[in-house]
Amino acid sequence: MALIFRQLFDPQSSNYTYLLGCSDTGQSVLIDPVFEQVRRDEALIQELGLRLLLTLETHVHADHVTGAALHRRRCGSRIAVPAASGTTGEDITIGDGQTIAFGSQRLTAHRTPGHTNGCMTYVTGDRAMAFTGDCLLIRGTGRTDFQQGSSRAMYRSIHREIFSLPDECLLYPAHDYRGLSVTSVGEEKQFNPRLGGALSEDDFAGYMDNLKLAHPKQMAIAVPANLKCGAPDRPMQADEPDWAPLNYTFAGVWEVQPAWLEEHLHEVQILDVREPDEFTGPLGRIRGAILIPLGKLSERLAELPKAKPIVAVCRAGGRSAQATNILRQAGFERVANLSGGMLRWRADGCAVEGGQG
């Protein structure tokens, strides 16, 4: 039974979200989900054939709102938070040493206060990977100057709970601001400039207590929301298109299925972005389709009224996916890609004009 693992990134907050799944049962967990990335994460989970069992927080974040509450509302996952977080609305509180199971896979929670009082590091059952939150970063550490932070507590947490792991254990932090993605226990013991080598607790405290960093920009919004597990004071907006039953892919593209489209052709515009010889070629075309090759689309956008939704189509769905991005950037809001393109349309037995039987 293999561990399914994906590292996901939110560019706005430089936050990493981690998806871990059991290949045998399909059960999965998300560590540190981001509110704005819920749709992306769920698309990946669906494409990998997984079911989200839990969202796990490493701590109460100050720079983004967690996606935990929205995931729970959309797919029924449960919310798990460290016991000392001071939150409300969670389903499970996780204590030091507690095991989190998803299928045949396991994570063990290690309390690592310092950045906040409720910080947790999650370690895989084979001790090959650890998710350190904002405690230990890559060649750095989280800050200790707010949210019950303590530089001395952080130093002890790292040395007792993280540096006691095998040197080859890979470490995955909650953030990185330089494009780095992973480190190891051995590397950080040797090279971390804040606490590696022979640096003492006093050395670390003196360094951390004089950083004088500005507070995170989203702190006033993020912390109150995260103390309620990501549930805002106002109702959460699903922000789902309402003109068709669309699927959102991990590539960030809304797709419509052939069966629905064939029954609702009169309600949409069909934009065919193939080349002219393909439009009149063996695959045929969808009735009423407008031909604008992808390379000409940006300069011919004025030919497309915004009154009706647009479904883009090409041979297999790749060029038309790019066309939906061009349309959205130009202000077209109701846009979707035909899943699988004309190949899928023909395979599903949908009607065509022209082409070869």
Image: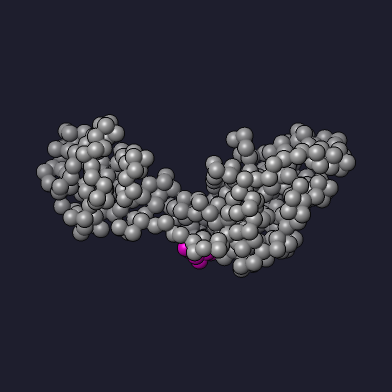
- Counting from the top left corner in percent of width and height, residue 97 is at 74, 60
Name the residue: 13% across, 42% down. 355
Q: Nearer the viewer, residue 313 or 306?
A: 306
- Residue at position x 68%, y 45% in the image: 215
Residue 283 spot, x, y in % from top left: 18, 42
Residue 30 seen from this side: no
Instruction: Determine whether, in the image, residue 342 is placed left or right of residue 117.
Output: left
Residue 256 in the image: x percent, y percent?
A: 30, 53
Frontmost residue, 298 versus 356 = 298
Most foreground residue, 162 or 347: 162
Q: Can residue 133 be seen in this view?
A: yes
Look at 50% across and 51% down and name the residue there: 36
Q: In which quarter of the image is the N terminus?
A: bottom right
> How many numbered discs?
0
The secondary structure that most of the magenta stretch takes on is helix
Query: Which residue range is magenta in the image?
Result: 72-77
Q: Would you identify the image quadrant in which residue 140 lies?
A: top right
**Which residue corresponds to the image point at 62% horizontal and 34% vertical from the top-left?**
178
Please state if 13 lies on the left or on the right of 196 as rendered: left
Q: Quadrant of residue 143?
A: top right
